């Protein structure tokens, strides 16, 4: 009887230790599942943020390309205006420089071209800009007055 009791006690002890081991494994598996869920959520959030960042980068790239295009167009337009003004001045064949009236006429021509160009641009009104007449008095380059 004592042996039987010892054998029963041994089985109970073995069953209890096996049950404790299973509970420990199940607990660790549950912790791993929770950790896996947290990692999956963090990954999905990072992926969404990355997609948003890519979309912002693409929008900024398109805006940048548009601005560069407008800058190129403005430079081309201004160079063409300057060439027109240069040709107009050369046609008048000034030997001693332009008078103030001539300068004002050239500036008005450039302003008119700019106003025409601005009026052709979508959503833009005519520029309301005028230049004051250029004074007849020539400045001495060695003085500030």
Image (spheres, rainbow, N blue to C red):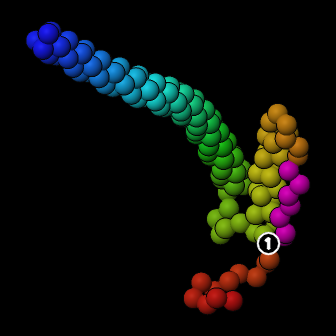
Residue 61 spot, x, y in % from top left: 55, 34
Label 1 sits on residue = 134
Left or right of 94 on screen, residue 38: left
Q: Give the residue drawn at x 76%, y 69%.
A: 99
Q: Split into 4 quadrants, where in the image is the C terminus?
A: bottom right
Magenta part of the chain: 127-134
Q: Give the residue drawn at x 50%, y 27%.
A: 41
Q: Give the residue drawn at x 79%, y 40%.
A: 117
Q: Is residue 128 magenta?
A: yes
Left or right of 1 on screen, residue 54: right
* In the foreground, 108 or 27: 27
Q: Main secondary structure of the magenta part?
A: loop
Name the quadrant containing residue 134.
bottom right
Left or right of 6 on screen, residue 86: right
Image height check: is 97 above or below 106?
below
* In the foreground, 103 or 12: 12
């Amino acid at each position: 009887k004592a042996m039987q009791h010892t054998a029963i006690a041994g089985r109970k002890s073995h069953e209890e230790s096996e049950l404790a081991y299973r509970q420990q494994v199940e607990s660790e598996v549950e912790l791993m599942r929770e950790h896996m869920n947290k990692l999956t959520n963090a990954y999905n959030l990072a992926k969404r943020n990355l997609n948003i960042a890519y979309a912002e980068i693409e929008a900024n790239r398109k805006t940048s390309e548009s601005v560069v295009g407008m800058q190129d167009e403005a430079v081309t337009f201004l160079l063409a205006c300057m060439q027109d003004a240069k040709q107009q001045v050369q046609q008048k064949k000034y030997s001693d420089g332009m008078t103030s009236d001539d300068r004002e006429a050239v500036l008005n021509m450039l302003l008119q071209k700019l106003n025409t160009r601005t009026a052709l641009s979508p959503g833009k009104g005519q520029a309301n800009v005028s230049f004051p007449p250029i004074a007849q008095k020539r400045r001495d380059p060695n003085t500030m007055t």
